Amino acid sequence: MSVQFVVNGRKVEVDPPARMTLADCLRQQVKLTGTHVGCEHGVCGACTVIVDGEAMRSCLMLAAQADGATIMTIEGLSSDAELTPLQLAFKKNHGLQCGFCTPGVLMTLHALLTQEPYASDERIRDVLSGNLCRCTG
Ligand code: FES
Ligand code: FES
């Protein structure tokens, strides 16, 4: 089936099998491998991307459901020349170890802080509780 969406500002047309997840489609057909796949059943948050402004687990969404959507992946968060303040803060504070969970964490936080720029520490912790980090627990 033909599916069209905009990802990181680029319009793409893909031809995913009916049951292919958005995560697999982004990685295999669009070649955006910054979106990681961990649990594949919605628990770890590693596959989080932003779909029409909302943080979504791309392992729980079929590629076909993204038809017409606007998607941002970790590759679209910043340009090569400039990191976002959130990315700079992670870098400055060594906010990662192996980095496997990091794209999902950044996309989750980017969506939150876009909608709630003044989110409290408690709110941030609550939202981030859906992203599991195997290095740090
Ligand atoms: Fe999607 Fe874990 S891979 S939530
Ligand atoms: Fe390794 Fe989070 S830094 S899984």
Image (spheres, rainbow, N blue to C red):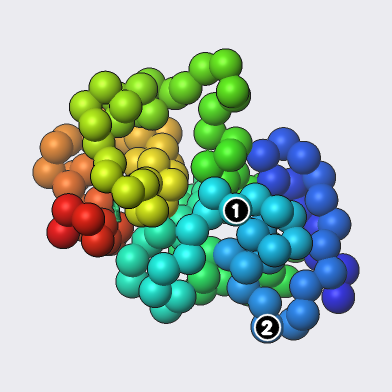
Q: Is mark 2 within 8 Å of ligand 1?
A: no
Residue 102 locus on image (x, y percent): 37, 46
Residue farthest to the top, as pictured: 81
What residue do we see at 41% from left, 68% from top?
Answer: 38
Mark 1 residue element:
loop
Q: Earlier in the sequence, mark 1 or mark 2?
A: 2
Residue 108 seen from this side? no
Residue 42 found in image quarter: bottom left
Number of marks? 2
| Quadrant placement of the C terminus | bottom left
Q: Is mark 1 within 8 Å of ligand 1?
A: no
Crowding near pointer 2: few (<14 within 10 Å), some, many (20+)? few
| Quadrant placement of the N terminus | bottom right
Task: Check disc 2 and report the residue beneath it.
Answer: 19
What residue do we see at 81% from left, 45% from top?
Answer: 11
Amino acid type for the residue under numbered disc 1: Thr
Mark drawn on residue 33: 1
**Placement of 42 over or under 54, stated as above or below:** below
Residue 26 seen from this side? yes
**Placement of 121 over or under 19, stated as above or below:** above
Residue farthest to the bottom, as pictured: 19
